[in-house]
Image: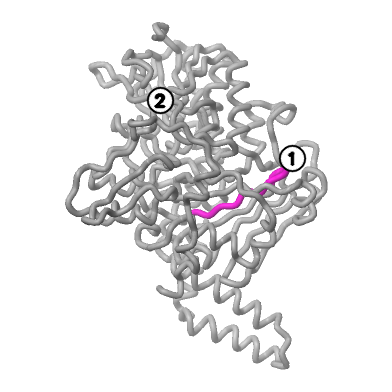
Amino acid sequence: MIDERFDAIVVGAGPSGNAAAYTLATKGLKVLQIERGEYSGSKNVQGAILYADALEKIIPDFRDDAPLERHVTEQRIWMMDDSSHTGMHYRSDDFNEEKPNRYTILRAQFDKWFSARVKQAGAIVLCETTVTELVKDIHGRVIGVRTDRSGDTIKADVVILAEGVNGLVGQRSDLRPEVAPDSVALAVKEMHFLPRETVEARFNLTGNEGVVIEAMGTITKGMTGTAFLYTNEESISVGIGCIVSDFVDSDITPYALLEAFKNHPSIKPLLAGSECKEYAAHLIPEGGYKAIPQLVGDGWIIVGDAGQFVNAVHREGSNLAMTTGRIAAETVVWLHRLRNPMTKENLSEYTRRLSETFVMKDLKKYRGIPALLHGNKGNFFGLYPKLISQAMQTWFRVDGIDKVSKEKEIFRSFRSARTLLGMMGDAFKLVRAWR
Amino acid sequence: MSELGVSGATSVKVEEKLFQNRYLVDAGRPHIRIKAHEVPSRGLLAMTHLCPAGCYSVSDSGQVEISADGCVECGTCRIVTTGTGEIEWNYPRGGFGVLYKFG
């Protein structure tokens, strides 16, 4: 079907694949991007927050025409028990800046826009086509791909695997191991529509200001996980996700968990009267630094979720995806111009460059966090949120009991639930993993 | 763990959620197949509650069955049965399957 030979084939058209294809095409390389969806974005799911910095480094003027929902001016972090939430809110007018830092987006629409830019830059984008396998030569070097369109091999100097968390192509070619159930989260999400005036009144917003809420606590029923609620222009994205192996050990359905979160007394009024127009589910790689597979080989590079590039602590993923896609492409462009072959050794320049960016630095910093949280999920996702909630209630409820007694009661509740030594141990482990 | 149970969990109908979504079903070519088995593994059995689209069920004789039409292509079943190989999992053919409007 396609007899030509390409400088690079990009598998997948999410943020990492689009970043890679765009960067390659703008530098004049002959690029084929293959996407299984009807259009770029039709299979893609995210919360979704767009971090401007990562995209600005690829498309500096993206704000001119990208479909952006609201720029984030307020971040709420909630620790929840069954009837309460204890919140840390940060709202700043400084986020109402000429070039805002974070936006809420709808991925299906955003990815479609990004894909149009990729095409404008000169890449060939082939949609409705699933890559079925990598083609290797007798030396084991990747020389192209096969798709479900035809059995023919489409050849390229290098294949960039931007195929997302499931990463079937890379995994079937033994380029990367299967994702382990304890290092991936299953998230479910709904899109709830409301008039934009209602969104603005309900969240105290002016114009295109937006609020994001990240929540943890008894809402995940003792499982390692978090929930979120993001304001879009005239809709609200609401979702919850937990580590897959925790779901296996439970008897809870993901949709019942989402329903319970939506019905929490702190969430329900925010969604009142809304109309749900879509239900989605997606896996999020949360294994962090220790789960990153081999990223390069002879004729191939892995970027984005396929490489486990998600900072679960900060809920960052799309920015890591775009940054890894961009740097992989820049490495390929650099080798192409030097007329150097796309060998494992030469492509390892990509991992070297990555190690100097926030991507690897952040993942390395938090390398101990996934195991810590998962290993102590009962305390971090059940016990502590409950204790904090009780403490806040004891503190704020005025009932004729003196403050010294209240302090003693709070201290006693913590100590009886978790020994002093246990709490110190948890704090110590958390600090150590955080550093 | 009973205190951790989700109240009203049984009343949540996933079909009503999936009804919101758009699909292009590849009739007669399901992209997920369960291999013939006598007794399902713990992971495969867990899919009956874990699948976010409620695609999995247990037959009267105790085998796990799938109806993949409402599949949202998350890949959870693939990951929990990697060790057992009980599921043959592929992406739908290009263009088929779930079509997200918002994502």
Quadrant that contains the C terminus of chain B: top right
Magenta region's main secondary structure?
A: strand
Residue A100, which numbered label?
Answer: 1
Mark 2 element type: loop
Residue A130, which numbered label?
Answer: 2
Residue A235 coordinates in the image, percent (x, y): 68, 46
Q: Residue at x 50, y 44 (%)?
A: A310
Q: Which quadrant of the view contains residue A101? A: top right
Q: Amino acid at mark 1?
A: Pro
Mark 1 element type: loop
Q: Amino acid at mark 2?
A: Thr
Which one is closest to the eye, mark 2 or mark 1? 2
Chain ID, mark 1: A
Residue A99 coordinates in the image, percent (x, y): 76, 36
Residue A263 coordinates in the image, percent (x, y): 59, 63
Q: Which residues are magenta?
A: A232-241
Residues under numbered marks 2 and 1 in contact, where contact means CB atoms less than 8 Å apart: no
Q: Between marks 2 and 1, how big is the CA–CA gap?
A: 36 Å
Residue A47 coordinates in the image, percent (x, y): 58, 45
Residue A309 inside the magenta-drawn segment:
no
Is residue A344 placed above or below A358 in the rendered structure? above
Residue A240 inside the magenta-drawn segment:
yes
Disc 1 crowd, CA 10 A, few/some/many (<14, 14-19, 20+): some
Q: Residue at x 62, y 32 (%)?
A: A109
In screen coordinates, is B31 left or right of A19?
left
Closer to the N terminus: mark 2 or mark 1? Answer: 1
Pick the front one: A6 or A337: A6
Disc 2 crowd, CA 10 A, few/some/many (<14, 14-19, 20+): many
Chain ID, mark 2: A
Q: Can the viewer see residue A327 in this picture?
A: no
